[in-house]
Amino acid sequence: MNPVISGEQLKLFNPHLLKSFCQNRFTFIDLFAGIGGFRIALEKLGGKCLGYSEIDRDAREVYQKNFINYVNSDEIDLGDVKQIHHLPWRIDLIVGGVPCQPWSIAGKSGGFDDPRGRLWFDVIRIVELNQPQGFIFENVKGLTDPRHQKSFSYILESLTNSGYQVQWKVLNSYDFGLPQDRQRVFIVGNKTLDNDRIFFDFPQPLKQKPKLYNAINHISCQEVIKTKFPPEILYGGKNKIPPARGRFQKIDELNDFFIFADIRGGHTTIHSWDLIRTSEREKYICEVLRKNRRSKKYGNKDGNPLSFADLLTLIPDLKLRELEKLVKKNIIHYKERGYEFVNSKISSGINGISKIFMPYADAISTLTATGTKVFVSKIAIPCQTPDEYKRLFIKEVYRKRRFKSLTVKDYAQLQGFPDYFIPHPEERTAKKQFGNAVSVPVVFHLTQSLLLVILQNETNQSRDISSN
């Protein structure tokens, strides 16, 4: 198999533009450099790195192994961004993936109260002191959420007041050729000039339609013709379509993934009672508990244990021994004042599995630094009726273990890193670093658009100066 995202560094890009940019070599500073996602894209566009900043030891080792030639390199390890002030060069671009944990749910959304959140103050200070021609900063989509509106506005206003036209947009890696549903906010600035200027515009999505099998090895490349279903079959009625379906979930098609969760419903949800030998009566009891555990009449939590007395009001002929059998099967347990599922967290999944994606899926869920319990099926399953789809998946994929975890190579491909990139030798660390990285093709196209503006504005400014 020859994945689309492989081979020479990023061969899907316009060679004529690359030649133009190489002739107009630009300089850049790589802040919060990580393992070099920004740098790969910028060097492909002809950029020369003058200095980099990364304080994580493991990430710095990978960065230096891939990019730094200690014999010929004249670039500087800038160290901690808090110690960076005036730089001794003319800088065209400053780029960086500013630490995202303070703005994400996983990082407890501490914002500026988190020391990592306050690193934005250093970013603003460095831009203001050194006045590059432009900048690109990346962060999690959570930075744009209403709860962070005041902080986000402060960042944008401060960068604007430093002398820049500033714009921001949430971009998805899928739109730039990667089969990953990864949304990140990019803040882009170019210097405000007194003369006529071209304004920056974000790049448009590519016309590619990637699939998981384009980026992941050793899985089926078979396409599946999807049957269209009315909402009565998929959801039980037109008014029962879940409102929170994602971009890659069609309302009239079966999902391209199966989620393992006892506390959720849906035509591609796998419950523990689907995997353990259970009677129809036991399945019914589990479904009653699942459908009622979020009811406010049983408590104010997002999921509440139900007592035996509570369940009796829902199943009048229920026997205590029936619940005890489900406890022995490790499907439910007694917690606080009642019964709750053992597998009561979606993030934990069931038996170490959160989701299994079909190989023909458009995109896998976002890779993260904290790891994932997401797998990919090695084979395709025909999209027949919902019941048959689920039955075949359990029989042919789950029971026969015909699915695979993501390898370090898969992580690299899903982030658009080139084949020659040397990852960290320890698997867990390498996956964490790729999960933290920027998607290379997104940065490439974004920088390409910004450079067009900067180069043209510089040309216009030189023309105005000469005419005076």
Image (spheres, rainbow, N blue to C red):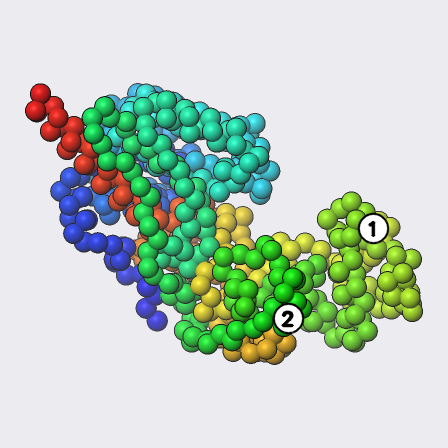
N-term-proximal mark, 1 vs 2? 2
Q: From the viewer's perspective, is residue 352 above or below residue 146?
A: below
**In the picture shown, does residue 221 fall above or below 187?**
below
**Placement of the C terminus among the 4 image quadrants:** top left
**Which residue lies at the image location 53% right of the left edge and 69% below the top edge?**
253
Residue 49 point in image, percent of width and height:
26, 37
Tell which of 227 and 406 is nearer to you: 227
Helix, strand or loop for disc 2: helix
Q: Amino acid at mark 2?
A: Glu
Residue at image x 37%, y 22%? Answer: 161
Residue, disc 1: 298
Quarter of the image with the N terminus in it: bottom left
Nearer to the camera, 464 or 271: 464
Q: Is residue 122 in sight in this rendering?
A: no
In this figure, which residue is indicated by the disc labeled 2? Answer: 232
Is any atom of residue 36 visible in this view? yes
Q: Residues within 10 Å of mark 1 (few under 14, many from 20)?
A: some
Q: Is residue 291 above or below residue 61?
A: below
Give the mark count.
2
